[in-house]
Image (cartoon, rainbow, N blue to C red):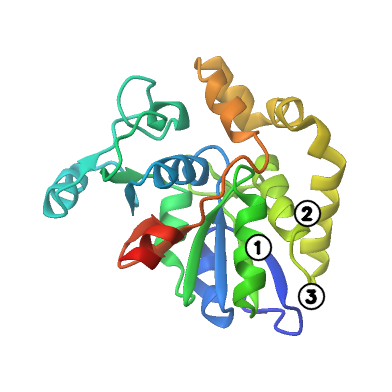
Amino acid sequence: MHYAQQEFSVRLQWGLDAARLLSGQADHCVVVDVLSFSTSVDIACARGAEVWPYHARDDDAQAFAEARRALLAARRNRVQPSLSPASLQQLADGSRLVLPSPNGARTSLASCAAGTIAGCLRNAAAVASHLAREGGSVLVVAAGEVDKDGRLRFAYEDFIGAGAIIYGLSGSKTPEALAAEAAFVLARHDLENQLGLGASAAELRERGFEEDVALAAQLNVSDCVPLLRDGAYRALEALAEA
């Protein structure tokens, strides 16, 4: 994990430890948690919201939200703002939302790159275009899934989401990055079905969150580039106007 692959300008690694140990050796870090943190951040920020990542929905989360005059996202449901992307489609402009997540949020907070971005399939081209304009090295961190015992496991949807962003980048790419790019190219014309066959999507569908999978599988429908600054994700355009 300590090998940063610095001879390559586009790199891919997995999980919290990658963000914590390797992000400081790249100019940009892109956190990819397709189901559902990154997709939720994209939808919320595109609507003019600020999203504060938080490691877990625990007893301290409410106090954290109150200190920032923000709404604490509920446990996943379709009615209240939550980690369900579908629940954020009507979020009001100017909303402030604390979004706990054991994967994407924790990985975001672990990043110490100069620029940390939430990337997903929806905004893959927009994120890649921004990175191309900025220049410099890029570490793409696929968040993966964390089992109840804390072990990180492969998440197909994050591999494909990372590949979609890498596909839009030029420069030298690690073998891992090239593999993700190739997987995306193979899946890109059938993304909803491909993601739906994965373990994470199957679990969501069993719980009745089919719409979350459909939203997460949409490719390049968003121009939003959510950038983490001062603890919150905000759309790049909003930061430029501030």
- Left or right of 214 in this view: 197: right
| Distance Cα–Cα, label 3 vs label 1 | 13 Å
Residue type indicated by callout 2:
Ala
Residue drawn at the location 16% of the way across and 54% of the way down: 68
Image-quadrant location for residue 78 = top left
Q: Residue at x 82, y 38 (%)?
A: 187
Sequence-wise, which precedes: disc 3 or disc 2?
A: 3
Q: Is residue 126 above or below residue 79?
A: below
Q: Residues within 10 Å of mark 2 (few under 14, many from 20)?
A: many
Give the foreground label among 2 and 1: 1
Residue shown at 41%/52% (left/top)?
Answer: 105
Q: Nearer the viewer, residue 204 or 213?
A: 213
Q: Which residue is mark 3?
A: 171
Q: In what quadrant of the picture does the N terminus appear?
A: bottom right
Query: Is residue 48 at all visible to an observer of this figure?
Result: yes
- Name the amino acid type tagged 3: Gly
Marks 2 and 1, the one that precedes in the sequence: 1
| Left or right, 194 with reference to 16 | right
Q: Is 230 placed above or below 80 here?
A: below
Label 1 element class: helix
Q: Could you give the CA–CA distance between mark 2 and mark 1, rounded to whole angstroms?
A: 18 Å
- Which of the 4 quarters of the picture holds residue 76? top left
Query: What residue does disc 2 label?
Result: 180
Q: Amino acid at mark 1?
A: Ser
Callout in the foreground (3, 1): 1
Q: Nearer the viewer, mark 3 or mark 2?
A: 3
Q: Are marks 2 and 1 in contact (CB under 8 Å)?
A: no
Q: Position of residue 166 (x, y in %)?
A: 73, 60
Q: Quadrant of the C terminus?
A: bottom left
Q: Which residue is mark 1?
A: 129
